[in-house]
Image (cartoon, rainbow, N blue to C red):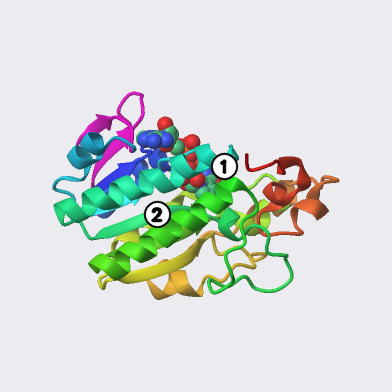
Amino acid sequence: MKVLVTGAGGSIGRTLGRGLPRLGHELRGLDLAGEPVPGYDAGWIIGDCLDPAVVDAAVRGVDAVVHLAGNPEEDSLAASLQSHVHTTGRLLDAMVRHGVDRIAYASSNHAVGRTPSGETLTTSARPRPDTYYGTAKVAAEALLSLHVDRHGMSAVAMRIGTVEDEPTTVRQLSTWLSPADAVRMVDAAIGVPAPGYTVIYGISANSRGWWDLGPGRAIGFDPQDDAEAFAGSILPRPEDEAENAFAGGPYALPDLERPAF
Ligand SMILES: NC(=O)c1ccc[n+]([C@@H]2O[C@H](COP(=O)([O-])OP(=O)(O)OC[C@H]3O[C@@H](n4cnc5c(N)ncnc54)[C@H](O)[C@@H]3O)[C@@H](O)[C@H]2O)c1
């Protein structure tokens, strides 16, 4: 499949550059700046997802879009909406113009980050963001749903946990998504055959995981790694208990609270 990856120069974009071509995909990358990343053999576009001319050129001729571009940290409400919602809207407009009907979106656990731990977190839980970042992810998910209903697209919102080579905190023993599983997840998300809107949780098959992997498995995402393999090397920290109280971990703590305007 010919795939546009936005934010291709970032951490997850580089991971996909290593993994998706091995599964037969041909990648075109888009990022704000920087050198082309290995694995992106179908072209590298430097530009902003907010620019309609840039996204038009980027989307032309692809079969699917993987939208990663955006600031993965907390910011002001206005900047968060621009980074996650406006970029998604620009891409969806271009997809409609060019007849591209599949998108896998890098949403986040922070869309439901204020959900207390204790019970399995399902994808039918109410949107419960922990930050303006998470609020923007909720709104971007809503835009996907709107476009599925209006245009018959296939859209998968991947609520990603923590993508790192290895988990390094106690929370990450439940939220870790290994790089290999991240590739498996995106491969499954762009391969969904029928139109529709799906939300999945993007974590590995962690023994301590408490986010429902069922919807991911239903679209063919079968994670193979388990953070537990690293448990012996992770030292407990005083903040572990607070970080484990909510799905969003440190983002759900009061330090990030600030007025919207
Ligand atoms: N890494 C994680 O653990 C994690 C967890 C949950 C969600 N996510 C989401 O996954 C996506 C990728 O995360 P990452 O860790 O690779 O982030 P990253 O910061 O490493 O990479 C993001 C890339 O997007 C690019 N970018 C930002 N705004 C852009 C724009 N307007 N136009 C074009 N390019 C733009 C940046 O230049 C950067 O290279 C983000 O949307 C993030 O919110 C990541």
Which residue is labeled 1 in the image? 77
Classify residue 60 by image quadrant. Answer: top left
Asked if 257 appears above or below 114 in the picture, the reply is above
Identify the residue shown where x is 20% and y is 41%.
56
Q: Is mark 1 within 8 Å of ligand 1?
A: no
Identify the residue shown where x is 28% and y is 38%.
29
Classify residue 59 by image quadrant. Answer: top left
Q: Is residue 162 visible?
A: no
Residue type of the residue flagged with mark 2:
Tyr
The numbered mark, 2 or 1, whose residue comes first in the sequence reads 1
> Residue 22 placed where, x, y %?
28, 49
Measured in 3D between alpha carbons, the distance from the residue under mark 2 to the one under mark 1, in whole angstroms, is: 20 Å
Which image quarter holds the C terminus? Answer: top right
Residue placed most toward the observer, 12 or 232: 12
Q: Is residue 255 visible?
A: yes
> Residue 127 placed where, x, y %?
57, 64
Which residue is labeled 2 in the image? 105
Identify the residue shown where x is 47% and y is 66%.
200
Q: Is residue 37 magenta?
A: yes
Residue type of the residue flagged with mark 1:
Leu
| Callout 1 secondary element | helix
Residue span colored magenta? 24-49
Left or right of 114, for residue 43: left
